Amino acid sequence: MTKVDRRILKTQESLKKAVIELMAVKKFDDITIQDIADRANVNRGTIYLHYQDKYDLLAQIMENHINELREMDTWACELEWAEALVPYFEYFEKHYLFFSTMLASKGAPSSFRTQLLAAFMEGFKGEIDKVSGKNSDMFEDVMLQYAGTAYVGVIEWWIQNGMPYSPQDMAKQVGALLERSL
């Protein structure tokens, strides 16, 4: 595996940060490549060395976050709900600007919320209690839609309200609710 030059990584991080910061103050459709270049303090042509356009840049940012959350799924499913959800809420807190922009902003593309919901629903598939009988009369797709939508909705609420509770408190509350539903 080839090692990526640190200057390239630094430039890409600067561009990602710039587009998210800009989205916090204006609609994505109104942001220009020049706006991104100015905010990141790079030449306009530099953006095109790394991304096809602003849509490609945003798509890669969204994909990176979804992939990081999916990586957590690989080990979180081995834990109890409340314990497993702490790292997720800490991740949302750490990346507050991104999630507040993508979930709470009216000008953000709705595709991220759709992708996030799909990722969570996929992660919940293996968590449905099929042994105790509590879900024997429930359709799996309905349960997944319910739990996924509720989870994303609670995350949106938490972020829009300035994260009034700690990640640990949120994990405990949401974990209890998901355990009851799934």
Image (cartoon, grey):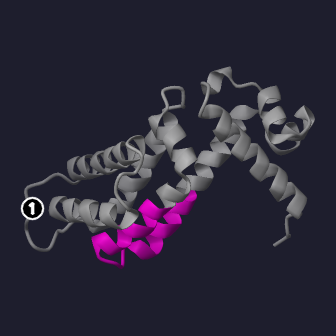
Q: Quadrant of the C terminus?
A: bottom left
* Residue 120, placed above or below residue 40: below
Which x, y percent locates residue 107? 54, 26
* Residue 106, placed above or below residue 120: above
Residue found at the far top of this picture: 30
Which x, y percent locates residue 20? 64, 40
Q: Amino acid at mark 1?
A: Ser
Q: Is residue 36 left or right of residue 152?
A: right
- Whether 71 is among the magenta residues is yes
Q: Which residues are magenta?
A: 67-90
Which x, y percent locates residue 57? 71, 40
Q: Quadrant of residue 131?
A: bottom left
> Is 62 or 99 nearer to us in this picture?
99
Secondary element under disc 1, as helix, strand or loop, is: loop
Q: Which residue is mark 1?
A: 136
Q: Quadrant of the N terminus?
A: bottom right
Q: Is residue 12 left or right of residue 62?
A: right
